[in-house]
Image: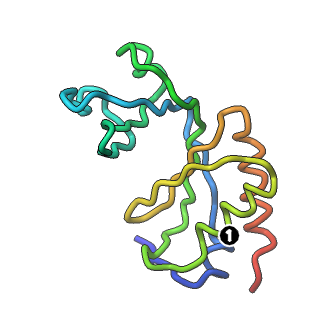
Amino acid sequence: MSPHLSSLAALLQSLEPSRHDGVYAYAVLPFDTDPASLQPVVTVREAEGVTVIVPIEQAERHGLRVLFRAAWITLTVHSDLQAVGLTAAFSGALAMAGVSCNVVAGAHHDHLFVPEEQAQQALDVLRALQRTAPD
């Protein structure tokens, strides 16, 4: 396993964005629904319900109302959870390009959920950010 990077320059140089196949859906489940039956990629418990991110096919098969159709991009750099500035750097670059971004931080990687129709644009922006990162 690679060491977790914390230097912003090193993080940006090592972003290596990678898109997962398929389309992913944001949906909200009632509290009495077991999210495990859906095999969600992400689960967040909020006061209003349980938000899940699942492959679009699962959402449709279970009759869930899709709130957002997204492409899933993982920044494969092993980022330190205490690193400062990475989220601001990539979200700022995406914002300047007019791409919305929902971020989920895992223990090893950051996962971005962007509008599915802007997936390639998001990848292009992230790769440009990586190429132009300071030494």
Residue at left offset 31%, top offset 36%: 49
**Residue 84: image location, x then y, percent:** 54, 80
Does dot 1 land on a helix, a strand or a loop? helix
- Look at label 1 and name its amino acid: Ala
Is residue 91 placed above or below 18 in the rendered structure? below
Residue at left offset 73%, top offset 47%: 99
Seen as rendered, the residue at the extreme front is 47
Query: Splitting the image into 4 quarters, where does residue 12 fall?
Result: bottom right
Query: Splitting the image into 4 quarters, where does residue 4 fall?
Result: bottom left
Circle 1 packing at 10 Å, graded few (<14), some (14-19), many (20+), is some
Number of numbered markers: 1
**Residue 129: image location, x then y, percent:** 76, 66
Front-lying residue, 111 or 97: 97
Front-lying residue, 74 or 81: 81
In the rendered image, which residue does mark 1 sit on? 89
Residue 94 in the figure: left or right of residue 72:
right
Is residue 13 placed above or below 65 in the rendered structure? below
Residue at left offset 70%, top offset 40%: 119
Residue at left offset 52%, top offset 29%: 67
Query: Splitting the image into 4 quarters, where does residue 36 fall?
Result: top left
Image quarter in which the N terminus is found: bottom left
Front-lying residue, 49 or 62: 49
